[in-house]
Amino acid sequence: MNMKKFSLISVSLILAAASAFAWTKKSENTGNLGRMYVSLGGGVNMSKIKDVAADSSVSPTGGYGEVVVNAPVFKPGVNTFRNIKWAGVDAQAFFNYDYLGKFDTDMLTNASMSTYAVGAGITPYLNFVTTLPVLKAIKPFCSAYAGYAWSDYSYDMQQESGSENYFIYGIGGGVEFVIIDNLSFTPMWQWRGNAQSGKACYQIVSAELTYWVTDQFCFAAFWTHNFGYKDFDVDMNYTHGDIIGMKFKIGFMR
């Protein structure tokens, strides 16, 4: 319970600090980085799981949902960074829910698992503006996050169910390509770790195509690929997973 309170307080403090630095003026940048917004996303989670003991595989289909708040801490050319137009820093708060779906193996019947997490992160980036007609800016970035996760699992054959909660953290990097003022493409790599004994870390790659219809409304399509990990508790390999979905973003003029 103390960890839950700590996570929520940390998220609130980060967003409050971001607002204090970046409230007074709308960002002069395009794309997602350097912009204040709330993102609501969801998609289909398609996985492949191998039962090591039975040497068989299943491919359950589940769902995914997320809420992300992005707030610029330092904007290129604005406020504290008034004389620095080539760099910026954003902060994020997030909540996500990942449902693996139900599946059967030789060892497990009607098995399912769901995980939800809350946390906060920071994304420093560089801002290179070009004069090209179809590539307005290039923004390489790195990111780091920390938070807390809760997992619930069940399976009928052994009539067992349970839950676990643990500290999570990760690092990553990518590039946002601002193609035109309203359109951007962002590939990204991320390593995701945790402090739970026996729980594997893993890597993902993702890509997002974003279109801001106006400064207040945006639609985005995204894809995430999980390279897999081994679940030591039930002797299974999560071979790989893919999430395909859409996001709706609400921007705030700053």
Image (cartoon, rainbow, N blue to C red):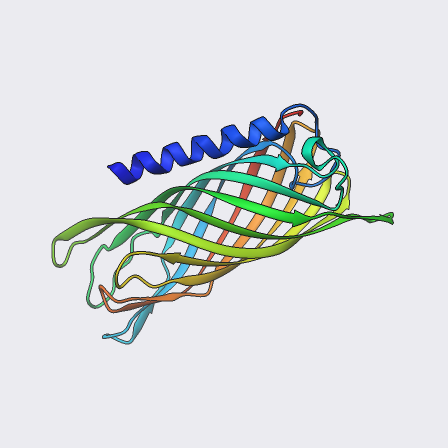
How many circles with numbers are drawn on the protein? 0
52 lies left or right of 67: left
The quarter of the rendered structure image containing the N terminus is top left
The quarter of the rendered structure image containing the C terminus is top right
Q: Considering only vertical position in the picture, is 44 above or below 107? A: above
The image quadrant of residue 46 is bottom left
* Identity of the residue drawn at 67% across and 24% down: 253
Q: Considering only vertical position in the picture, is 55 above or below 60? A: below
* Identity of the residue drawn at 26% across and 64% down: 198
101 lies left or right of 78: left
Task: Name the foreground residue: 128 vs 212.
Answer: 128
Q: Considering only vertical position in the picture, is 204 above or below 19? A: below
The image quadrant of residue 236 is bottom left
* Identity of the residue drawn at 36% across and 38% down: 7
* Identity of the residue drawn at 59% across and 32% down: 37
- Residue 23 pos. (x, y %): 62, 25
- Residue 153 pos. (x, y %): 24, 51
140 lies left or right of 200: right
Q: Considering only vertical position in the picture, is 6 above or below 25? A: below
28 lies left or right of 244: right
Task: Name the foreground residue: 157 vs 128.
Answer: 128
Task: Name the foreground residue: 44 vs 200.
Answer: 200
- Residue 89 pos. (x, y %): 62, 42
- Residue 2 pos. (x, y %): 26, 37
